[in-house]
Amino acid sequence: MKRSHIFSLVTVFCFLLIGAGDSGRAQADDSVIRIASGRKGFTYRAVYARNLEKLMPGYKFAYLPSEGSGQNLDLLAMGKADVAFAQADVFAVKQSQEAERYRDILPVGRIAPECVYIARRAQDPKATLEELAGKATEAYAVIAIGNYDSGMLWSWAYIQSLIVGLDRVRASTESGTLALNHLALGSLDAVGWVTDPNNRDHKMLRAVHANEALELMPLNNQALTAARSDGSPVYEARTVMGGPGGKGPKIQTICTQAVLFTRKGAPEALIEKLSDLVSLKRDQIAPSDAR
C-alpha cells in the first residue's frame, strides 16, 4: 500500500476517534443536570433536589448554590442551570417585570406549599407586623430577610404592600442562624424565611425552638390573603407547626407553592421525565414523612 494511502487511512481513523470522543462527551454532558437548588441545609437542596436525584438514576446532578428562588430563576434564565426550584410568586413577579428575560423558563409543575415564617423575641412588645410597622414609625425597626434574590425578599416586598407602615421597616441581608442569634441579642427586630411547612427538621425552626428567647410571629392579618384585582389571592392562610418534629405551638401564616422549573429548550426526554415525576411521584420528591 502506498505511503500516501496509509497516511489517509490513519488520518480518517483519527478523525473517527475524535468524533467518537466528542459524541461520548456530548452524551455525558446530556446526562448531567445542573440544578439551582439553594443553600445547603435548606429544603430545596436537602429535600427536593436530593429526592429528585434519587428518582433519576441515569443522570448526574451538579448542584449550583444560590440564595433562593430569585437567584435560582436567574441561573435558569441565563442558561447556567437546567432545572430549578422556586416559589410561584417569585416567578410571577419576575416574569411581570422582565417578560423577555424569563420567557424561556418552563414551569413543570408544583412540588409543595411554601410558607412564610417570621421569628421574633418572645418578650418583645412589638410582636406583630402591625406593631413592627408602628415601631418603624416611632424610631426604626429591622427585619433580616436574606440576600438579594432570596425567596423571603420577594415575599417581604409583597407583605409590605399590604400592611401600612411596613415600608418603613429596614431590611437586612443577614440570614440563617446568625441572624437569629442577632435577633436574640436585640440588634434585629425580626427574621424571616420561606420554607415547606412540612419540613419540620428545618434548621431555622430547630434554632428558634432551641432558643427560649425566640418564637414565631403569627401572620393572621386578613389583608395578607386579600384577593388581587383579578379575584385570585397571592397567598392562602394556613396553620402550621411552630417547631421541629411536630413540637411547638401551631401558628397561622401565609403560603404559596414551590414549583419545579426547566428551560423550554431543554431535551424533550428531560422535560418528559421531569413532568412524569412531578405528576406521578410528587410525594416522593416532597414526602411529608421525610420533611
Image (cartoon, rainbow, N blue to C red):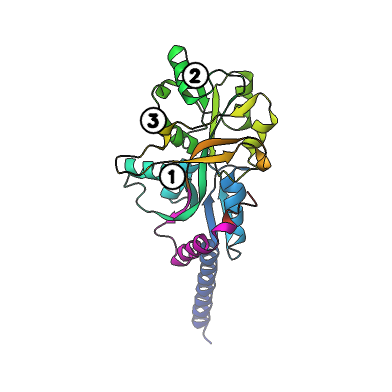
Instruction: Name the front one of labels 3 and 2.
Output: 3
Which label number is shown at residue 22?
A: none
Asked if residue 157 lies left or right of residue 44, the reply is: left
Residue drawn at point x = 49 percent, y = 19 percent:
141
Which label number is shown at residue 162?
A: 3
- In the rendered image, is residue 52 in sight? no
Instruction: Name the front one of labels 3 and 1.
Output: 3
Q: Earlier in the sequence, mark 3 or mark 1?
A: 1
Distance from disc 3 to disc 2, alpha carbons, whole Å, reads 17 Å
Mark 3–mark 1 CB contact (< 8 Å): no
Number of other residues with Cα within 10 Å of mark 1, as a class: few under 14, some 14 to 19, many 20 or more: many
Q: Which residue is mark 1?
A: 74
Distance from disc 3 to disc 1, alpha carbons, whole Å, reads 26 Å
Task: Decide: is 252 above or below 107.
Answer: above
Residue drawn at point x = 48 percent, y = 16 percent:
135
* Magenta residues (range): 258-284
Mark 2–mark 1 CB contact (< 8 Å): no
Q: What's the amino acid at mark 3? A: Leu
Residue 5 on image: x %, y %:
49, 82
Q: Earlier in the sequence, mark 3 or mark 2?
A: 2
The quarter of the picture where residue 201 lies is: top right
Residue drawn at point x = 42 percent, y = 24 percent:
166
